[in-house]
Amino acid sequence: MGTTYSLQAMLEERLERKKALLDHLYDAWDAIVLNGVKSYRIDDRELTRLSIPDLKKQIDELEEEVEELETRLEGRRARKAFGIIPRDW
């Protein structure tokens, strides 16, 4: 049982860190896109309107990572991506 607890604790810590980073990215998005500021700084990184596509990509990726960690913490398996190829017989 000790291994399970440490795995859960590790997942919870990773989830909290990713949520905190996601909050910073949401703040940057709001400032640049909604409030029209010219630049926004996160630690040593400065974001501008030119950063919007990169910022959107980072937000999307982090949201997926957060969702995956939450799923793992709930004891469910992470969703697997798959494709369906229609065939004309």
Image: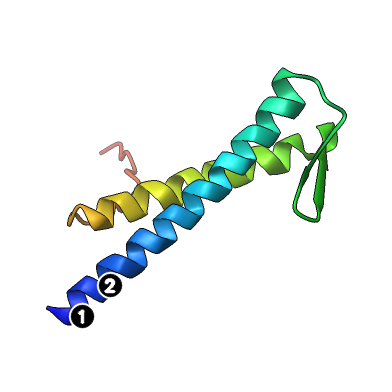
Q: In this view, does 82 lie to the left or right of 35?
A: left
Residue farthest along the right direction in this orientation: 38
Residues at marks 2 and 1 touching, judged by CB atoms closer than 8 Å: yes
Image quadrant of residue 88?
Answer: top left
Q: Which residue is drawn at 57% across and 49% down?
A: 21
Image quadrant of residue 12?
Answer: bottom left
Q: Which residue is drawn at 34% across and 63% down?
A: 11
Q: In this view, does 60 lie to the left or right of 25?
A: left
Residue 63 visible here: yes
The residue that disc 1 covers is 3
Q: Look at label 2 and name its amino acid.
A: Leu
Q: Position of residue 25 (x, y in %)?
A: 63, 41
Image quadrant of residue 3?
Answer: bottom left
Q: Where is residue 7 in the image (x, y as percent from the top left)?
A: 27, 72
**From what the image shows, is residue 50 above or below residue 71?**
above
Q: Is residue 32 left or right of residue 3?
A: right
C-alpha separation, residue under disc 2 versus residue under disc 1 = 6 Å
Residue 81 visible here: no
Q: Look at label 1 and name its amino acid.
A: Thr
Q: Where is residue 35 in the image (x, y as percent from the top left)?
A: 75, 19
Q: Which residue is drawn at 32% across and 43% down?
A: 84
Helix, strand or loop at label 1? It is helix
The residue that disc 2 covers is 7
Residue farthest along the left direction in this orientation: 1
**From what the image shows, is residue 80 above or below residue 32?**
below
How dense is the environment of label 1, judged by Cα within 10 Å: few (below 14), some, or many (20 and up)?
few
**From what the image shows, is residue 70 above or below residue 53?**
below
**Scheme of image coloration:** rainbow
Q: Is residue 42 left or right of residue 64?
A: right
Report the quarter where the N terminus lies. Answer: bottom left
Report the quarter where the C terminus lies. Answer: top left
